[in-house]
Structures are given as C-alpha cells and as structure tokens.
Image (spheres, helix red, strand yellow):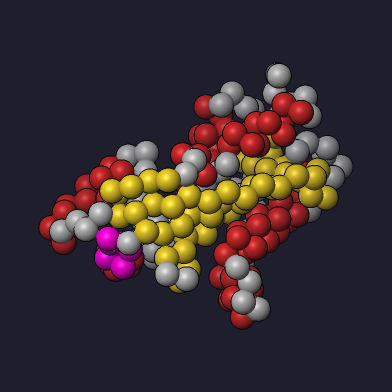
C-alpha cells in the first residue's frame, strides 16, 4: 500500500523513498506563522507547536478532494529550532540566513521533530524526538564561503544548513538521531508501519 506524504519537503520524501516506501507527496498548506504566533501567545512549548503543526498538516491533507474516502495512511511532520528559548524559522533570503547562523554560532540549539500518521481523517499515531547540535565558533570568512558554496538551498532549512552536506562543517558536537535532525524521526515511523503491515517485519 502506498502512503501519502503531506509535505513539500524533498528531504522527507527522499528519506521515505530511500527506505523503500512508495509515497505520493501531496503538500498540505497551513498558515504556519499564524499558528506559531497563537501558540506562542499561549506560552506553548516548542514540542507542542511541532506536534500541532504536524497534526494540522495531516488533517488538512485528509480533507483534500482527491483523498475523499482514501484509506491510505497520511504522514505529516514538522520541525522547530530553539536556541536560548527563541524560535527560529526558515530564513527568507541569504542575508537572513547569515544573520541566523551568526546568532547560532558557538551555541547549542535544539531541533524538535514531530511526525504524525492519520487515516480516514483521524490521527492514529504520533511521535516527537529532539536533538541537540552545537555550532563551532567559525569565522565570518568561513561563513561567507559556506553560504556562497551552499547557495539558496540553505533557505529550505529552518537552521540554514543541511547536515547531510556542507552544513556538517558548522558543528563541533551533535547529540541525537540523524533522521530527527533531517526533520523526520524515521526509525519509530518504520516500526509503526511494520506493526500495521505496510513494511515487512
């Protein structure tokens, strides 16, 4: 049985396909900024925000006309980056990416990734994981060279880096699951899919 991925993330789609899963990507559009502002006003922790965003994406995807009556599992995920209690979003341009990396330099930050699975409009499974990454005290010259080489691909990441590529050079220490850092806690998801007969056990 194929799966629905309620995301436009190429990294998440690649992870699932490389794991041997057949997926159909159907991005679910939600107003993430408005939702984050509302939850921040309620003093919600970042873990709750990541989970809420993932749930809303799954529920929005389930209401798409082309999925009416569809019994396939819908996978949705979201990620939050937190440093010194400040939430970070994807940078809007290269100047914002530079400011963001300067702000994160020489500090630890947390990446919190939530994944949910929905079926027939209801959430049937959820999982949240976090990782702690410490950036090294890199020079401004290194930062400029990094951004020039990495290019606008950094704008697709909440941290302005891809750990699986050149971005690994930004770090001095990484604690946590690799897939969680990439934005999808893959191993627990695979356990769920095995338990439900989607992946062979």
Is residue 87 rendered to the left or right of residue 147?
right
Classify the position of the C terminus by image quarter: top right
Instruction: Report the front residue among 155 and 166.
Output: 166
Name the dominant secondary structure of the magenta segment.
Answer: helix
Res. 135 in view: yes
Rendering coords of residue 29 (x, y %): 63, 58
The residue at 56%/26% (across/down) is: 19
Which residue sits furthest top? 200
Q: Is residue 4 above or below residue 1?
A: below
Which quadrant of the structure image shows residue 99? bottom left
* Residue 154 covered by magenta stretch: no
Q: Is residue 122 above or below residue 188?
A: below
Tell me the magenta residue range: 101-106
Is residue 159 rendered to the left or right of residue 200?
left
* Residue 105 covered by magenta stretch: yes
The residue at 37%/38% (across/down) is: 164
Res. 156 in view: no
Q: Is residue 64 above or below residue 39?
A: above
């Amino acid at each position: 049985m194929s799966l629905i991925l309620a995301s436009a993330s190429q990294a998440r789609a690649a992870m699932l396909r490389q794991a041997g899963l057949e997926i159909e990507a159907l991005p679910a559009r939600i107003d993430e900024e408005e939702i984050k502002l509302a939850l921040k006003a309620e003093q919600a922790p970042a873990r709750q925000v990541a989970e809420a965003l993932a749930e809303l994406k799954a529920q929005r995807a389930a209401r798409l006309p082309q999925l009416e009556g569809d019994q396939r599992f819908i996978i949705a995920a979201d990620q939050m980056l937190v440093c010194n209690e400040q939430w970070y979003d994807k940078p809007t341009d290269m100047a914002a990416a530079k400011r963001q990396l300067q702000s994160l330099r020489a500090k630890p930050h947390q990446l919190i990734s939530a994944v949910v699975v929905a079926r027939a409009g209801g959430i049937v499974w959820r999982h949240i994981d976090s990782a702690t990454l410490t950036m090294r005290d890199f020079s401004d010259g290194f930062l400029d060279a990094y951004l020039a080489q990495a290019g606008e691909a950094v704008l697709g990441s909440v941290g302005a880096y891809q750990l699986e590529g050149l971005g690994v050079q930004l770090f001095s220490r990484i604690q946590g699951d690799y897939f969680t850092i990439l934005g999808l806690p893959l191993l627990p998801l695979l356990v769920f899919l095995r338990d439900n007969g989607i992946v062979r056990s």
